[in-house]
Image: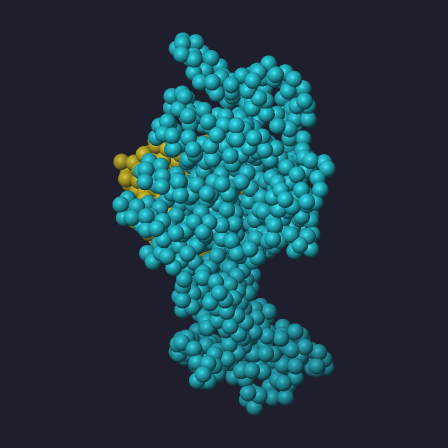
Chain colours: A yellow, B cyan
Amino acid sequence: MSVLRPLDKLPGLNTATILLVGTDDVLLQQLAGSMLKEDCASELKVHLAKSLPLPSDVNRPRIDLIVFVVNLHSQHSLRNVEESLHHVDSTFFLGKVSFLATGAGQESHCSVHRNTVVKLAHTYRSPLLFCDLEVEGFRTTMAQRLVRMLQICAGHVPGVSALNLLSLLRSTENPSLEDL
Amino acid sequence: MAPERKVKNSQVQRRTSQGSNSYQTRLSAWKVREDLNDSKSISKHRKNSVVEDFEHGDNQVEDALQIAVRYFEKGPIKTAQRKDKTLERHFKTVENVAWKNGLAPEGIDILLNVALSGRFGSAVNTRIFKCMIPATLISEDSVVKAVSWLCVGKCSGSTKVLFYRWLVAMFDFIDHKEQINLLYGFFFASLQDDALCPYVCHLLYLLTKKENVKPFRVRKLLDLQAKMGMQPHLQALLSLYKFFVPTLISVSLPVRKKIYFKNSENLWKTALLAMRQRNQGLAPEPLKLMLGNVCPVKRKWNSHSVIPVLNSCNYSKESGKKGMNLSDFFSSNGSFPLEQLKSFPQLLQNIHCLELPSQMGAVLNNSLLLHYINCVRDESVLLRLYHWLSQTLQEECIWYKVNNYEHGKEFTNFLDIVIRAECFLQEGFYSCEAFLYKSLPLWDGLCCRSQFLQLLSWIPFSSFSEVKPLLFDHLSRLFFTSTIYFKCSVLQCLKELLQNWLLWLSMDIHLKSVTNSPLETTLGGSMNSVSELIHYVGWLSTTAMRLESNSTFLLHFILDFYEKVCDTYINYNLPLVVLFPPGVFYPALLSLDPSILNQLCYILDRYRKNLTAAKENELVPKTKSEFSFSSKTYQEFNHYLTAMVGCLWTSKPFQKGLYIDAKALEKAAVAEYKNSLNLVHHPAFMSYTVSFLLQEWPEERTVNMSSVRGKKWNWYLEYLFSEGFQGLKLFIQSSIHHSSVP
């Protein structure tokens, strides 16, 4: 199956495309909705996928940012993301991949430990964001932040590149809270 | 022993029936052991019972409860078949009441006895413990009695563990702690038991006072640590000991560790939360916010707040008696009822006989008690407050209970009160810091933004490199991906943090000999930490300027921060001057906004005054301190100064400081660049030049900007000063010799 590469297509004029990958279809759609509501100079395109690889026969624009959404309440969602990651070209990890963990607020419902995701993000050298997507307020702010990241990744912010942003967001070896 | 106890118990009943005097001891009937049928007559005079509001006079429930408790008290009946059924039935009754209304002190007393006396199996004991939820308070005596059962050795290890966990969870609800503290030695000895150790540690952590810290205990703890390795609970206790008596413990303990006990181990969390809300609802009227005396509070505290209502147990005891005279009052306990404390003179008169409430949270709402806390030198008071606060913060935090979103407003109010208390005491609470460690990674940057940032600005001074991975790394991640408004509020909050740190440090230097700060850092170490903070903000600012394409709005906030930074030497008397990074200086110098340039001039002037003062002090041999600024700081400053003078004054912009190769300028085909950044031609001032020329020579047909030189230049300066450019005025007066007018 096809591996997703960041530079195998030319960018569209003033368009920025994000790909959300995750098992929770409803949450992804809501997040996409909130993103499209954001006021933004670039033309936003949001693609949703349950898992990678994507079907190869569809014509789609260049993807500027992939966000893997992990629901901490389901092991399945984590495994799905882990498998999807194999279908992403390594150059994508130079700033065009991000992880989003949802459900961390309700600790009692979590079946995936927070540290597992932290490690996952660290292994792939990509930023990890936390947000409880079920709450509308939180979702809106997250959508706002993702749009800003996307604009940078698409090269629409002068002077800042995706790799640059990555170096700003990268986590140092954090002591986990469990050690505290 | 039995008859004596009984007398005491009846006292306890009175003492614990607290709050409004309508809290009748509704279950006092349990103590009347003679006849069960008496309960009917007792229920009659239970009329004023507040709890009746909930039960609507449903005496049957209470009777059933009494029967159930009696059943437990008597012990199991041997016929196995019937036993199971009745046991179940009675359990149901007790559990229902416990979860709905909580149990009265007497009920808890009896159940505690039952659970620890080993009359039932350990499964039953566990169940009893789980439903032992107080309606209001737990009497100290019950706990003492319970501990005496532990000595008999009739209960299993798991029951003991459960007892300690229960004790820790309910610690705040025990009406007095003096007698329990007398048992300190007994609890300490229980540390030997590996299974009990974590829970006993937690209990001791709550119980320890300064006088409990003894050399032999320290030795024992260190032995235990050597045996069991670095356990968080042992570390907690050790660090507490070290906090009280730093001289006794020489081993180094990690300073950063601030979460020792996991709240998740609290089995009674939800029940306690429900209970607290219920009690708030019951309170006759919410206590007036007394902090209002200090800074007026407009919002009225609504129905059930998180903060417990202030009540001292002694008060209710006394208020029960109508004809109480003064001598009674003094002979009884000698402590002043907190509810009657209404004014500052009262506080002064009674300061020797105040007893803090059993639920420390009540203090937050009361400015007088905050005064009191501030002046008593009792660390255990603050520790109790911290413990209460960290538990409440975690329980109330909104994103731990996503489903209950309306709860948000209440949480915001609570945070506001905590912040007000911090402002009032001018010190940060460690529990708030620990709360931030835990919740900042999950924060979305919007909800309760102002509260969170204010909490952040009150973080107690600590080593920056240790706090950075826990707080500031998460903050910078939010910072870079959020809106410009968020960036501005973060910078504002960091400015306040810096100010708080500087104030603490400047106080600390003078008080160094008096207080023994738990950090035990040297002045050099502290200065290092502050300069790391400043460099961190410098890094944030430089990147933010790039991300926001040199926004003037953002630059204002950045320069506001540096207005604090440039004055550390003179204003706070601290040996520290850190300059701004080029990423801030040049955008400000080339800004299109005249007020930015004015602010930059002011800051540069202050830097100059601070550095000159430092240099003068260094030259005087007596005052020469161990801290001298590196020549690099002076070089950097001189570099900025030449760049600035070159641009604004001498019209030689790109030679020194801001150097650009002449060839590059040639290539860019800029014909006339020398004048282009001086006070007349600088884009920020151009409009002023034009209006100056139009105002002075209205008859001139063309506006010739280059004509402003010599005398005209001086008039132009006067004009600029009259337009309010005070920073520019200071800068020119101090840094430029007036002979050199271009």
Q: Is residue B182 above or below residue B35?
A: below
Task: Please tell me which residue lies in front, B161 or B638.
Answer: B161
Which of the 4 image quadrants contains residue B155? top left
Q: At x 47% / y 12%, what residue is drawn?
A: B86
Query: Which quadrant holds the C terminus of chain B?
Result: bottom right
Instruction: Give residue A119's position: percent from left, percent from top.
Output: 32, 44
Q: Is residue B168 above or below residue B623?
A: above
Instruction: Give residue B322's position: percent from left, percent from top.
Output: 72, 36
For this view, does B582 lie left or right of residue B560?
left
Q: At x 60% / y 86%, what residue is drawn?
A: B709
For this view, does B715 lie left or right of residue B615?
right
Q: At x 61% / y 50%, what residue is drawn?
A: B353
Task: Please tell me which residue lies in front, A58 or B314.
Answer: B314
For this view, does B234 lie left or right of residue A41?
left
Task: Please tell me which residue lies in front, B282 or B678.
Answer: B282
Is residue B10 something that shows in the picture?
Answer: yes
For this view, does A32 lie left or right of residue B61?
left
Q: Is residue B579 above or below residue A25?
A: below
Instruction: Give residue B385's position: percent from left, percent from top.
Output: 52, 47
